[in-house]
Each structure stands twice: as structure tokens, then as C-alpha cells.
Image (cartoon, rainbow, N blue to C red):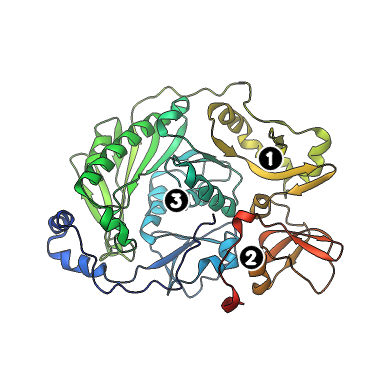
Amino acid sequence: MNANKRESAKSPPLASAPALPDAFEEQMKAQLAAEFPAFQTALTQPAPVSIRLNPRKQGYDSTDLIPVPWCADGFYLPERPSFTLDPLFQAGAYYVQEASSMLLSEALRQSVNLNRPLRALDLCAAPGGKSTLLASALSPDSLLVCNEVIRSRVSVLRENLDKWGCPNVVVTNHDPDEMTNLAGFFDVVLVDAPCSGEGLFRKDPEAVHEWSEASVQLCSSRQKRILSAAANLLDEGGILIYSTCTYNDPENRNNMQYLAEHGFQNRALTLPDDWGIVEKSSDDAVGYQCYPHRVRGEGFFISIFRKKTFTAAVKLDARTFRTIRALRTRDTASAAKWLQNPADFSFWEKPNGAVMALPKSLEKTFLFLDSALHNKGFGLDMGQFKGQDFIPSHALALSTAVNQSLPAIELSKENALRYFKKENLVFDTPVSGWLLAQYKGLNLGWVKGVGNRVNNYLPKDWRIRMDIKEYV
């Protein structure tokens, strides 16, 4: 199922503040004191709409947009369009992300040396907003592992990462406790923890009805378990970033203090006062809270830590690889021509015959992960040989590594939307062979000219089902 398939054209203002649970209201009055009425009023306003641009896919015109202060690639939109029916969204030119959560960008800038190759883990990754932010922030020679424990959410995560187009990404489906053989492996771990969702009350009224004090305590305990597992995955000196979309102390301040008492040193950020972000401290740590009446965004909390203790790191060795084998020499040349810089990649074949490309700078690490993890997908999905023919994958079309000299055809917006309806297209001039379908110079996917017709190779699961008449 495609992400962001069910948007309204514009987020309407709420008629009144959602009826807050009594215990939550008491909690917020204690936190905000005289600011509580402003907070309550903010919940009646339309939620701001913001996007974050993909720096490796230029094409979206942000000239007249207001920037998000804490994220160089973030911008506010004046209203909410139908993102599904924007070909630039489908091409991965931007991600629709709540502005407060983009504070991760500033946290990374201040706490991590992003100029050197790193091993990073997004432990609770779906649907992929923070994963794509990490992919943009890290150097191309860095490794990014994006893990989602809920199997049904992995496909959305994979799709959003495919759109983003970075070949240095691994998608995994593991409980954090199942990743013990990666002890001490990572330089950066992000735990954007599942939480009670108080910060989403304006955007998701259902979250109000699901909230309870028991749920807060359950979430806090679950978060502590996840943080305990995450701590073991970090190398000494590594950075752990903890975030939630909630306000309460059991989930935020108490777990922040838990880390400070269990082998981590808190790292303070320097944030301008005019950003409106509130500093929240415990005995040994400080975190940063966004409130909707203070920032142009939703509720969000973040705190940063450096690991002080040593965990024996996993040694990379020449284990027997679990699932893949080197591509046959005779097929390598055929596969290589689809990439812009094929010398930077090695080529491999999965048991089902699918061809994948691994960045050579990360090859040893990818092969180790192939042995270390059971439920994963990694490398650039290239496609598959069928006889003498090579059928390129959709992920290849969207990858930033694809050969920019491959034949391409520029589509109008109407034809681009028809492409995403998975209709077969008719062009004024005959075309033959594989072509990259493009919109404003960005790749959308593949079409193939066969005789007097053009076949549409958009994957069925990516097909949009909305009516496009008013948009063409």
C-alpha cells in the first residue's frame, strides 16, 4: 500500500479543542501553568503542513515557502495539497514530515560528525520520515539500518526509502532484543519510540480516545526495554538519540534520566530562544520539548546521549553468507550498464534470481549483515534476468545511482498521473526498448516500447486509486 494515500485537500480548522482526558489536562496545566489556555487554543487550529526536500533529487521549487528554522531542507506549505497526485512526491523529491520532528536534523548537526562514514540505526523506523532524514544527513559511505518491528509496516518503510533513492540502506524486521549479535556495532542509534501520542492530539482525534494513564505507563515501560536493547548496540562513544511525540514525564523525563543513570552522558543542544522550544531537565540530563502553541508544529520531545561504557563490538569476519552469491561474470557487464558509476558497486544474486548492487565501500559490512540478520532487505535492487533480457526494478529507476544517460521520456503532468494509475501510455512518436519515465527531470519509473504500444512497468502495489480528472 502506498504511503500517504489518504490525504484531504486541506486540513480544516477544528471547531473546538478536543475534549481532553481529565488526567491529561491536569498534567498539561501542571507543565504549562499560565500557558495552558494558549496550548488548548492551539489544538483548535489547523495543523501546519510541512515537507522536507530530498537534497539528492533537485526539482521542487521552494522559492516562496517559509523555511523550518531547525532543518535546512524543511519548508512549510500554505495549505495541504493532495500529495498522492503530485508526481514530484512519487519521485521522492520530498517527504511529507511534521516540522517539529525535523528537530532531529539540528540534533544530528550538533552531536554527530556527519563528515565521516558512520554506522547508523533507526530502531523504530516506519513509516520512514526520520530514516529519510538520516539518509540525507549521513555521508554516502555511511551505513543506515532502518528497523521496524511490526511486519505490516515494513512495506511502507521500504517504499519510502526506495523513493529516497539511497543505495547504502538496509531495511530490517526485528524486535530490538533479536539484534544482540550486533552488539557495539553502531555509531549512532535513533530510538523514535512508540508512545502514547499526546503530541498528535490535534492531528489525530482518535489518539485522544486511546489515551489513558495506564497506556502512558505501558509505553514508558516498553520504551525502557527498547532503550536497554539500543544501548547494547552502540559502540563506546556512540550517540543515542531518544525522541517521542508526547509530553509526559514517565515517557520523556524519566526515561531520559534512566539513560543518564545507565552508562550514558547527556549532550546539551544550543537552540535559539526565538525557536520557542522548551528545555526540560532532570537531575542529570536535559531534553527539548516542542509545544504547538510555541512552535509551528506538533508535540515532540528529543534528547541526546553519548555512550560512556564499553560493549564488546562484533568482529566482521568471513562467515558463510546466508542468502546471496556473486553475480556470474557474464551477467555483470549487462547489469553494470544500468548504473552511473558501476565501478563503485559489486553485483550479487539472490536465491530468487533478483540482482542487487552493493556499494564496494560497504560490501564487507553488507555481507556481514546478511549473515547476522534473518529478516532484512539491503543493497540496491537492480532487477532480474529473464533469458537474455534484463528487467530493471522500480527501485533502480528511483535510485540516485541509476545511469543518467539511459534513454528517458519526459511526461506531462497528465501523463505522469496516468502512469501512476498504471495506464498504458500513448506518445506522439514511436518509442522502443526501456525508457525512464520522467517528470521535471526526475525519474518516476520504467516504460517499455514494444511494437505499437508502450507498456507501463509501475509495480501494482504503487498504483494510485484516486480520481485524477480534476488534476489533469
Q: Amino acid at mark 3?
A: Lys
Residue holding disc 1:
356
Upstream in the sequence, badge 2 or badge 1?
1
- Look at label 1 and name its amino acid: Met
CB contact under 8 Å: marks 2 and 1: no
Rendered-image quadrant of the C terminus: bottom right
Question: What residue sits 46% from the left and 73% below the top?
Answer: 9
Q: Nearer the viewer, mark 3 or mark 2?
A: 2
Residues tagged 3 and 1 counted as in contact (Cβ below 8 A): no
Residue named by callout 2: 421
- Mark 3 and mark 1 lie on one chain; the one further toward the N terminus is 3
Instruction: Residue at the far right: name it.
Output: 451
- The mark nearer the N terminus, 3 or 2, is 3
Residue 368 position (above or below residue 452): above
Graded by Cα atoms within 10 Å as few (under 14), some (14 to 19) or many (20 or more), the crowding at tag 1 reads: many
Asked whether, in this view, residue 372 is left or right of residue 214, the answer is right
Q: Label 3 belongs to which residue?
A: 130
Q: Position of residue 130 (x, y in %)?
A: 44, 50
Q: Which quadrant of the structure image shows residue 86?
A: bottom right
Separation of marks 3 and 1 at Cα, in angstroms: 25 Å
| Residue at mark 2 to residue at mark 1: CA–CA distance | 27 Å
User: Could you say where residue 364 lies in the image, as x and y percent from the top left?
Assistant: 61, 30
Q: Quadrant of residue 377?
A: top right
**How busy is the neighbourhood of tag 3: few (under 14 within 10 Å), some, or many (20 plus)?**
many
Q: Is residue 110 visible?
A: yes
Provide the secondary structure element on which disc 3 rests.
helix
The structure residue drawn at horizontal position 61% and vertical position 35%, both measured from the top left corner, is: 362
Residue 3, percent from left and from top: 51, 57
Q: Is residue 329 left or right of residue 94?
A: right
